[in-house]
């Protein structure tokens, strides 16, 4: 294949991306926590990967999953990982053509397929899947023509539709390349580079590369999860509300941008209704090392939980939908049924500006995540000028209700960024906030957590005020396939929770 000779540029491009998106991670006052800056940056799971995809030798820090024995504070090799009962897998499908295509799940019974996504030229989409599940692509205007077909076969997660390269026929390949416009050629070349890099990445790490090369390391900090039961702590001035303010004091937040900045010496909003202690200590306990998941008891006070539950009385809940796998196309936008049986809960959205208590939850979440609270709201022009987008990196809080029999089957929170956006924005972290307890079932399960003592999933039992934090991205910027998680069916009672999604390096719908 004849490709441009300007191959030295890609390594430089990766370094530029890495520098562009170093986002400040603390407020003006450095929050007290148990980890140092070097603890976050010098992650022991990152190893130098040297590779050459035609641009000369390059190096990047790549995530290599530690030996499972170290999760038990043992020497490597002393224990072996179990094979999880759940054999689900991420499946990503890449359109390397200059035509829009449709992706279908194939029932393999002669019947029509189920539409997964419309995929734009040189873009990708995907879903959580299982071995032997079949998929195919068609033109948008003729679903009877199958352009490509695949059967999911782990460990392969990424499947490419490439109509340009003709295996074993260089002349036909060159003719196809010559037919492309300059813009299409460059986009196709980037896909070829990404595919070659993905091969090297898999050889080095044992994981598929679910991002698009080059993607910089996350701009936010990631808490380390070196062993089960490991604890970190962080203090925040966003202390608990222990008494309910008057309704007249809980109107919408009207301040905008830099007007919302609280200095270290400033009292917190509605301080008179809060705990008298100057700080709230939050302890993160490692539940899983791969994926990295933590529980934080007493993240919310009972007063805060009661307030959120009170808000539900004035809100209309809707059937939860599954978002499009590229973060842009939902089933509803595709004109198909968006209420699939994979997710049967009801939900609504609560925005940060709803009132002071909701605003406090965002501020406390920012301290827990070790990022500037200003990143979780729209900002003034003079705020964080090194961050090019002024949009919040957080979504509205999602309030979810599960009744008996309702669930959300195993899925990923991340999607696949559009090739035209060099930032490659994607969900970075999920913070689950439990609002009730005592139901049968309803656990949050991580079915593929890496361990050496059980094939069962890791089940987190809901507890009032408890939070669970997990990351959808690895420390090297790849998406974490192991972040697969499910809301198990409620067998008796009901389940209420909120979740907060934070993006990196920017938020794009």
Image (cartoon, grey):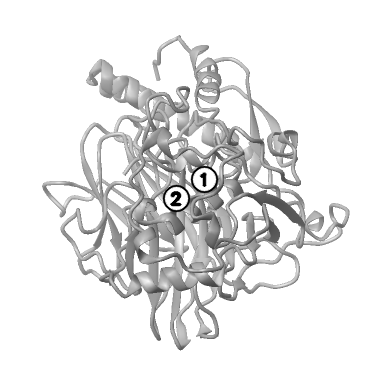
- For image coordinates 63% across by 74% down, the residue present is 456
Q: Nearer the viewer, residue 108 or 166?
A: 108
- Location of residue 318 with respect to 138 vertically, above or below: below
Drawn side of residue 362 relative to residue 63, left or right = left
Q: What residue sits 72% from the left and 45% below the top? A: 33
Q: Are marks 1 and 2 in contact (CB under 8 Å)?
A: yes
| Residue at mark 1 to residue at mark 2: CA–CA distance | 7 Å
Q: Quadrant of residue 28?
A: top right
Tally the numbered discs: 2
Closer to us: 222 or 327: 222
In the drawing, does residue 61 fall left or right of residue 303? right
Kindly identify which residue carries mark 2.
414
Closer-to-camera residue (268/381): 268
Q: Is residue 314 above or below residue 259?
A: below
Percent x, y of residue 34? 76, 46
What kind of element bears circle 2? loop
User: Image quarter for residue 335?
Assistant: bottom left
Q: Residue at x 26, y 54 (%)?
A: 330
- Can residue 38 be seen at all in this image of the molecule? yes
Mark 1 Cα-neighbour bin, 10 Å: few <14, some 14–19, many ≥20: many
- Reading the image, the residue beneath label 1 is 479
Examine the rendering and report whether any part of residue 424 can be seen. Answer: no
Q: Quadrant of the N terminus?
A: top left
């Amino acid at each position: 294949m004849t490709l441009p000779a300007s191959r030295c540029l890609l390594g430089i491009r990766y370094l530029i991306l890495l520098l562009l998106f170093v986002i400040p991670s603390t407020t003006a006052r450095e929050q007290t926590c148990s980890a140092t800056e070097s603890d976050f940056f010098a992650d022991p799971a990152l190893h130098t990967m040297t590779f050459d995809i035609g641009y000369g030798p390059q190096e990047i820090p790549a995530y290599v999953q530690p030996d499972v024995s170290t999760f038990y504070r043992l020497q490597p090799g002393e224990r072996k990982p179990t094979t999880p009962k759940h054999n689900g897998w991420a499946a990503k499908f890449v359109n390397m053509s200059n035509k829009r295509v449709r992706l279908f799940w194939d029932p393999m019974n002669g019947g029509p397929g189920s539409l997964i996504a419309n995929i734009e030229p040189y873009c990708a989409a995907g879903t959580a899947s299982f071995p032997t599940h079949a998929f195919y692509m068609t033109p948008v205007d003729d679903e009877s023509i199958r352009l490509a077909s695949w059967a999911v076969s782990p460990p392969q997660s990424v499947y490419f539709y490439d109509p340009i390269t003709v295996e074993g026929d260089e002349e036909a390949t060159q003719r196809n390349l010559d037919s492309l416009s300059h813009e299409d050629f460059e986009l196709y070349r980037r896909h070829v580079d990404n595919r070659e890099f993905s091969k090297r990445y898999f050889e080095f790490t044992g994981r598929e590369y679910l991002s698009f090369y080059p993607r910089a390391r996350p701009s936010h900090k990631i808490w380390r999860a070196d062993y089960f039961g490991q604890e970190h702590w962080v203090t925040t001035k966003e202390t608990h509300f222990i008494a309910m303010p008057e309704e007249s004091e809980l109107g919408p937040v009207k301040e905008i941008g830099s007007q919302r900045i609280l200095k270290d010496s400033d009292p917190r909003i509605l301080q008179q209704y809060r705990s008298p202690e100057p700080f709230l200590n939050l302890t993160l306990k490692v539940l899983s090392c791969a994926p990295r998941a933590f529980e934080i008891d007493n993240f919310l006070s009972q007063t805060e939980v009661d307030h959120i539950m009170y808000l539900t009385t004035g809100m209309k809940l809707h059937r939860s939908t599954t978002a499009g796998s590229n973060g842009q196309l939902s089933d509803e936008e595709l004109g198909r049924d968006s209420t699939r049986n994979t997710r049967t809960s009801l939900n609504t959205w609560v925005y940060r500006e709803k009132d002071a208590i909701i605003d406090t939850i965002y501020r406390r979440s920012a301290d827990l995540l070790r990022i500037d609270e200003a990143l979780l709201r729209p900002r003034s022009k003079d705020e964080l000028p090194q961050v090019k987008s002024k949009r919040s990196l957080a979504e509205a809080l999602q309030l979810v209700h599960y009744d008996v029999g309702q669930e959300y089957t195993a899925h990923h929170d991340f999607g696949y960024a559009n090739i035209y956006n060099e930032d490659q924005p994607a969900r970075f972290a999920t913070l689950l906030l439990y609002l009730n307890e005592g139901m049968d079932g309803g656990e949050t399960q991580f079915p593929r957590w890496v361990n050496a003592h059980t094939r069962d999933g890791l089940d987190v039992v809901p507890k009032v005020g408890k939070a669970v934090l997990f990351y959808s991205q690895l420390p090297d910027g790849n998406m974490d396939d192991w972040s697969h998680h499910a809301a198990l069916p409620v067998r008796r009672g009901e389940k209420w929770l909120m979740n907060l999604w934070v993006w990196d390096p920017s938020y794009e719908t």
